[in-house]
Amino acid sequence: MRSLSKDSLWLKQLHQWHWISSALCLLAMLLFSVTGITLNHAAQIEAKPKVTRNKATLPPALLAPLRATAQAHLDDKAPVPADASAWFAEYMHADIANNLGEWTEEELYVGLPRPGGDAWLRVNLSNGDAEYELTERGWISWLNDLHKGRNTGPIWTWFIDLFAIACLVFCVTGFLILKYHATQRPSTWPVLGLGVLIPVLIAILFIH
């Protein structure tokens, strides 16, 4: 009787962890399942990039600090001065705050990678001519990049790690619950074995 009580308590805990982990994983698991399909058929799903280009000339008062920064950080990376960053945001719609620029004597280049697209800003330090280009590849590309964690920043990377841990809890507790109910469900182990065997056989026979 004591053993049965302990088993019932343990099974209750497993069910609790199982539903909690499934609730935490639900939306992200749907997202990663759908984007798994879109990534697997990326060649058939054509993206139509939208490219936006802006050009402007930086005022001399803002160009001088850029030249000074370039001299201090030749062939290195360093932040763009705040006044220039604000000007680029207002007049060229280029949000470069918190991004490091690559500096040479001739130019400043700021790469602005992002999910679902790309962007960059280039400034000629001799005359202040600036060019900004933004490429957007659509929401499917954006979701695919979320799946891969491409240019998504550290917070999303941490979320993916936590989501993966929650998925592990979901799978392990599901397996242990199956183990408890296997005596009443004879098909449990054959179906589980089939779920393991199918991907293994596909990998061995069809992946070269």
Image: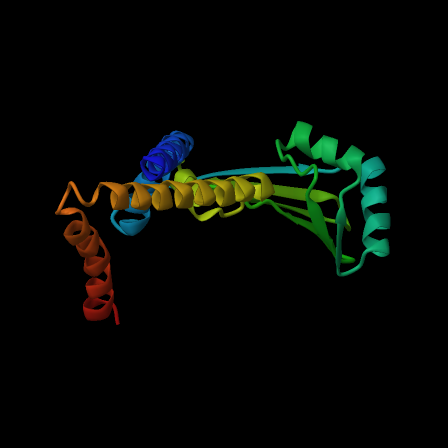
Residue 75 quadrant: bottom right
Name the residue at 62% across, 38% down. Answer: 55
- Residue 6: x and y in percent read 38, 37
Name the residue at 78% across, 58% down. Answer: 105
**Closer to the camera in the image, 56 or 48:** 48
Q: Is residue 62 left or right of residue 158?
A: right
- Residue 25: x and y in percent read 40, 35
Give the number of callouts.
Answer: 0
Residue reaching furthest left?
186
**Closer to the camera in the image, 138 or 152:** 152
Q: Is residue 125 above or below residue 62?
A: below
- Residue 103: x and y in percent read 75, 54
- Residue 176: x and y in percent read 32, 45
Residue reaching furthest front?
1
**Closer to the camera in the image, 16 or 161:** 16
Q: Is residue 107 left or right of residue 160?
A: right
Name the residue at 41% across, 30% down. Answer: 20
Name the residue at 73% across, 36% down. Answer: 85
Residue 15 quadrant: top left
Colour basis: rainbow
Q: Is residue 93 left or right of residue 79?
A: left
Visible residue check, residue 46: no
